[in-house]
Amino acid sequence: MKINIKFLNDEYNHYEGRIKSKNFSIINAPGIINSLSVLSFSGIGSIITGEGVFFDKGEVNIKVKNKNFNFDKLYLTSESLGIAAKGNLNLEKKFNSYDRFSCSN
């Protein structure tokens, strides 16, 4: 995993960066990602066993201020699922929205 972060204030709650990773799982993924992953046998198995949704590669540009995460150019790929998205996630309100979301399998 590679993480590049630039902090924009002294409280470390406002920053921007890029994350790239290989061979990882997302546990407690948003419902739409879980729903799409069950379209494959490996996806069903991962959800049932609690291993999360597995991806071969992933990368995202993020901007964070307080507990609001804006993500641009989110790409996640696996052998059975590819996702591209742009949107935000607010950890305080437990709310996420997508400006763009596309999927292929």
Image: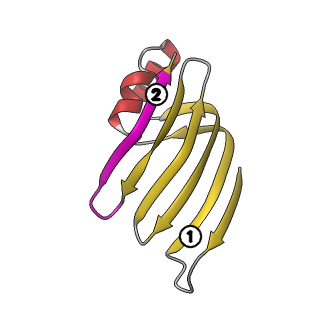
Q: Residue 32 carries which label?
A: none
Q: Residue at x 27, y 60 (%)?
A: 93
Q: Does the magenta stretch include residue 93?
A: yes
Q: Counting other residues with Cα less than 10 Å from the Cα at mark 1, is it few (<14), some (14-19), or many (20 or more)?
A: some
Q: Pointer 1: what residue?
A: 15
* SS for callout 2: strand
Residue 9 in percent (x, y) is at: 56, 82
Q: Residue at x 59, y 52 (%)?
A: 61
Q: Which residue lies furthest to the left in this view?
A: 93
Amino acid type assigned to the residue bearing label 2 in the image: Ser
- Bounds of the magenta span? 91-103
> Secondary structure of the magenta portion, mostly?
strand
Amino acid type assigned to the residue bearing label 1 in the image: Tyr
* SS for callout 1: strand
Taking 87 as reference, is 31 above or below it? above
Taking 95 as reference, is 7 above or below it? below
Q: Does the magenta stretch include residue 89?
A: no
Q: Residue furthest right?
A: 2
Q: Is residue 88 left or right of residue 79?
A: left
Residue 45 in percent (x, y) is at: 47, 21
Residue 18 in percent (x, y) is at: 65, 55
Residue 20 in percent (x, y) is at: 68, 47
Marks 2 and 1 close (CB-CB < 8 Å): no
Q: Is residue 32 left or right of residue 102?
A: left
Q: Pointer 2: what residue?
A: 102
Name the quadrant containing residue 12: bottom right
Q: How far apart are marks 2 and 1 (CA)?
A: 26 Å
Q: Residue at x 38, y 42 (%)?
A: 98
